[in-house]
Image (cartoon, rainbow, N blue to C red):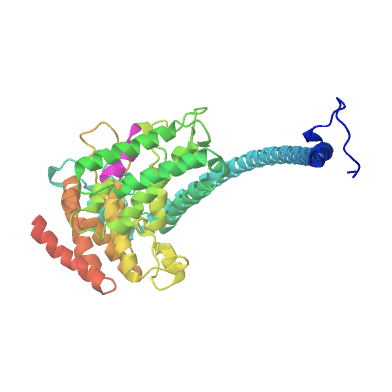
């Protein structure tokens, strides 16, 4: 501010306000206003710069975000592309594997089909060969039977003088004291012209071998391919379980046993209706009671034969294993009733012929002594001949063998001494089978008798004295005299022979019969 005199006012007049102080104040005010305006300009410029900076930052942030989003999108696209490529690769691999599996399955199917056709062709060839061999064997057996028949007649002529006079009388007078005999109770040997009750050893051996051959045929049948087919195998195994269960349930309860019998019969009847596979029934019937007419249908269900054979096997096992161990009731009788009723049912026959030879084949295998086959108990060959059982190659103990034989003897009596007089069906095992078994044992030479003969004889007689006498009358008393008195007196001494002597006293007390 200048120190010169104050300037006059606009009116040209000086006032009190034109003082230096006033001037200073005005100047300061003007300067302040100028400074404020300048500061405002600076603030506005700063704010504008800040706004520009913020805008630039926002633009930069937006651009950065856009770059980030672009990078993320690129990564996501790359990931999706990789996943899609991986899916395509896996899909291609799966399709390739499916094609390989389909190709492999088709190859396996073709191979299986070729193998099946090959097996069927082999089975047909084997079946044709078997039939040819069987036809040849039947012809050879027929010739052998003719030769043995001639030999038998010659042998009987030579040995006729050696037969005991009392045995001939017993055979020729089977209806003593006016006791009527059932029509099927007389053994075939009673009707021979020679009147002999004893067949030759050669004839016994030949007949025994025929049933052993049938037993082998049944074993081969069980392992045959037709019974291993899918569906057939499962059906057979299921029915096996049912038959095993029902045979094991046979007890002293007669009503329950009747139900078991009906159930077993139903299983076998249903099996007989199975259309495939089939077998020739003549292969399992050695002695048909009714000859098969030429050209008749002899085919029978293979599952029926299999299950019938299984039923017979379980029955005989029950005779062998349970009878001697059961003392509370006659276990052999209960099993024998069920078995006889099933095997005699006409619905299980073909051309009026039963399949009883299947049971006979199994019995020939396990108890040959009933048909006059004997051998020493202390040799391998002898034990094999009398049916001494092996388990995993080892012989069972002596006591186990004797228990088995006693049970099988009692079982044979229960099967053969059945009374069919009150029913229309025919007994497939008439009483002459029982008589023949006794004759085969009692005619064994003294030097060939064994303890096995004694225990089987005890099993045959012990529970069946009254039935035997009812059928054969005085002839039965004569045989019991031989069995319980004379037979044990001429053989090896031991508990088995002593048991027959004790049985003699039991018969005296129980049946009022003095021998």
Quadrant where the image shows the N terminus? top right
In the image, farthest residue toward the top: 11
Name the dominant secondary structure of the magenta segment.
Answer: helix
Residue 100: give x, y in percent of width and height: 76, 40
Left or right: 39 as drawn, with respect to 407:
right
The residue that appears at 43% across and 65% down in the rendered structure is 390
Is 343 a magenta residue?
Answer: yes
Is any part of residue 515 visible from this angle? no
**Residue 363 on the magenta span:** no
**Which residue is farthest front?**
13
Where residue 512 appears, as percent x and y from the top left, is 8, 57
Is residue 162 visible in the rendered structure shown here?
yes
Q: Locate the C terminus and report the quarter of the image it occupies.
A: bottom left
* Position of residue 224 measured from the top left corner of the image (x, y, whole percent): 55, 45
Residue at x-position 44% and y-position 38%: 304
Asked whether 56 or 472 is in front, the reply is 56
Left or right of 142? Residue 159 is left
Span colored in magenta:
337-346
Left or right, 231 with reference to 75: left
Question: Which residue is pictured at 43% across the width and 63% down the height?
Answer: 385
> Can you tell which quarter of the image residue 125 is in?
top right
């Amino acid at each position: 501010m200048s120190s010169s005199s104050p300037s006059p006012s606009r009116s040209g007049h000086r006032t009190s306000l034109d003082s230096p102080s006033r001037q200073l104040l005005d100047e300061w005010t003007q300067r302040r206003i100028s400074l404020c305006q300048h500061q405002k300009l600076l603030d506005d410029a700063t704010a504008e710069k800040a706004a520009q900076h913020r805008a630039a930052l926002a633009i930069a942030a937006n651009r950065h975000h856009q770059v980030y989003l672009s990078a993320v999108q690129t990564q996501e696209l790359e990931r999706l592309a990789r996943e899609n490529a991986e899916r395509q690769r896996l899909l291609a691999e799966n399709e390739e594997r499916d094609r390989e599996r389909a190709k492999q399955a088709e190859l396996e199917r073709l191979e299986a089909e070729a193998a099946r056709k090959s097996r069927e062709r082999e089975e047909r060839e084997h079946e044709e060969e078997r039939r040819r061999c069987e036809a040849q064997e039947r012809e050879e057996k027929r010739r052998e039977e003719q030769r043995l028949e001639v030999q038998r007649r010659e042998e009987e002529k030579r040995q006729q003088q050696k037969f005991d006079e009392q045995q001939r009388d017993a055979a020729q007078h089977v209806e003593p004291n006016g006791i009527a005999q059932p029509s099927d109770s007389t053994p075939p040997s009673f009707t021979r012209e020679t009147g002999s009750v004893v067949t030759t050893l050669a004839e016994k051996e030949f007949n025994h071998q025929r049933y052993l051959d049938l037993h082998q045929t049944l074993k081969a049948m069980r392992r045959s391919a037709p019974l291993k087919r899918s569906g057939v195998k499962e059906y057979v195994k299921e029915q096996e379980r049912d038959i095993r269960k029902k045979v094991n349930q046979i007890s002293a309860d007669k009503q329950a046993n009747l139900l078991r019998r009906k159930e077993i019969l139903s299983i076998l009847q249903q099996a007989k209706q199975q259309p495939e596979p089939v077998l020739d029934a003549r292969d399992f019937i050695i002695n048909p009671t009714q000859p098969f007419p030429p050209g008749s249908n002899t085919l029978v269900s293979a599952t029926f034969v299999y299950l019938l054979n299984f039923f017979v096997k379980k029955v005989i096992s029950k005779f062998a294993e349970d009878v001697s161990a059961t003392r509370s009731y006659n276990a052999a009788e209960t099993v024998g009733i069920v078995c006889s009723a099933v095997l005699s049912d006409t619905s299980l026959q073909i051309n009026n012929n039963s399949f009883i030879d299947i049971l006979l084949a199994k019995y020939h295998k396990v108890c040959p002594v009933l048909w006059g086959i004997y051998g020493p108990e202390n040799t391998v060959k002898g034990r094999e001949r009398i049916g001494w059982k092996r388990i995993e190659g080892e012989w069972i103990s002596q006591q186990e063998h004797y228990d088995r034989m006693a049970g099988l003897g009692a079982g044979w009596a229960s099967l053969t001494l059945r009374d069919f007089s009150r029913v229309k069906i025919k007994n497939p095992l008439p009483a002459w089978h029982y008589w023949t078994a006794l004759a085969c044992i009692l005619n064994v030479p003294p030097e060939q008798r064994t303890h096995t003969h004694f225990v089987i004889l005890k099993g045959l007689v012990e529970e069946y004295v009254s039935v035997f006498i009812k059928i054969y009358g005085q002839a039965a008393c004569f045989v019991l005299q031989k069995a319980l008195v004379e037979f044990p007196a001429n053989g090896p001494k031991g508990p088995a022979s002593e048991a027959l002597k004790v049985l003699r006293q039991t018969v005296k007390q129980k049946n009022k019969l003095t021998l």
